[in-house]
Image: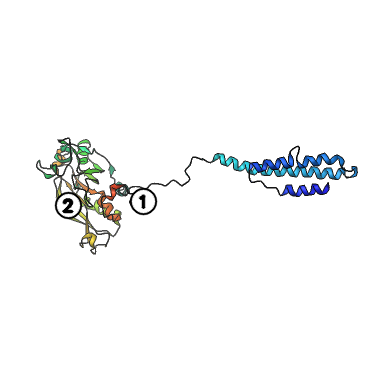
Amino acid sequence: MKNRINQLLEEVNQLIASNQDELEALRIKYLSKKGEVSALFNDFRNVANEDKREVGQMLNELKNAAQDKFNELKESFAGSSTSDQKSDLTRTADPVKLGTRHPLSLVKHEIIEIFSRIGFTIAEGPEIEDDWHVFGALNFAPEHPARDMQDTFFIEQNPDVLLRTHTSSVQSHIMTQQKPPIRKLFPGRVYRNEAISYRAHCFFHQVEGLYIDKDVSFADLKQALMYFAKEMFGAETEIRLRPSYFPFTEPSAEMDISCNLCGGKGCPFCKHTGWVEILGCGMVDPNVLENCGIDSKVYSGYAFGMGVERITNLKYQVKDLRLFSENDVRFLEQFESAN
Ligand code: PHE
């Protein structure tokens, strides 16, 4: 009897169960009414009287050990079964892949961020426009070629319903709605009737800037643009302004930056000139101020407009414009780290 108890005690201490079914089998084997421990208790009456005390103690010890072991194993399963209940079985097995910001959005936000530090706030205007806001108010002559079907998308053959060809149209909206001082940035999509190729698309994005106040000078324009160029492309970047023409600015200029690929030494990208063009700008033509109800004798201002695709190409050396609108993940994924 004593040997049998010791043997069972050893067995019980080494019990393991890897699931609920195995545990239940152990309970039946050792702890049920017909189990090993009960059987020994039934045999207890056959134990000699002088041994009863000792054997009784041993039996109780075995019974407690078996019960403790069972509880211990049960608890280990209980832990795992509650955590099973907490986990969401409908979740996908693979980690969910995060998307990335579109390169044009990244660059647009960067442009906005830079100008917001010198007091520019954002305004937006409609993409479907009328002739006056896109051309008339901006001093385009009636016969100007931009008004031609070749350059501009008209809607339903109506010459007064068209897709804006530049964000300068938002200038007309803001100047007729607000009194100076005006210091605004107009990001947005524009449309031109161009054949799609690696270097031209029928829609693209611009960010326009407009600053109107008393005594705004060309020097203010130059300073703001130089600040922008250095923030965007690095402190070593140089700028140059070349005389140009836009109907709505006088004088007008185009701005080049020193080629950020070769540092201005000359390379195929800058066609060996050391310079790349990034935007158009100028002092707002007094006619435009007057067209929009602003007194040109009291106020002056500057405007500039840049293509977001162009700036993005320079920053990330994207060689084909069409990549921006094809949504090829192999292209878009490359901007992950720029997020
Ligand atoms: N709207 C001009 C363009 O699309 C850019 C520009 C904006 C030029 C503001 C001067 C001032 O090319």
Among the two numbered marks 1 and 2 on one chain, the one whose residue lies closer to the N terminus: 2
Q: Is residue 296 visible?
A: no
Q: Which mark is residue 333?
A: 1
Q: Is residue 8 left or right of residue 232?
A: right
Q: Which of these two is toward me, 211 or 240? A: 240
Residue under the point 77% across and 47% down: 8
Q: Are the two marked residues, 1 and 2, in contact with CB atoms closer than 8 angstroms?
A: no
Q: Which of these two is toward me, 220 or 16? A: 16
Residue under the point 71% across and 41% down: 27
Residue furthest out toward the bottom:
265
Element assignment for label 1:
helix
On the image, the x and y values in percent for residue 337 come to: 38, 53
Sort mark 2 into few (<14), some (14-19) or many (20+) by Cα contacts within 10 Å. Answer: many
Q: Is residue 167 left or right of residue 64?
A: left
Q: Is residue 326 visible?
A: yes
Q: Which residue is the site of mark 2?
A: 253
Please, which colouring scheme is shown?
A: rainbow
Q: Amino acid at mark 1?
A: Glu
Q: On the image, which quarter does residue 96 sit in? A: top left
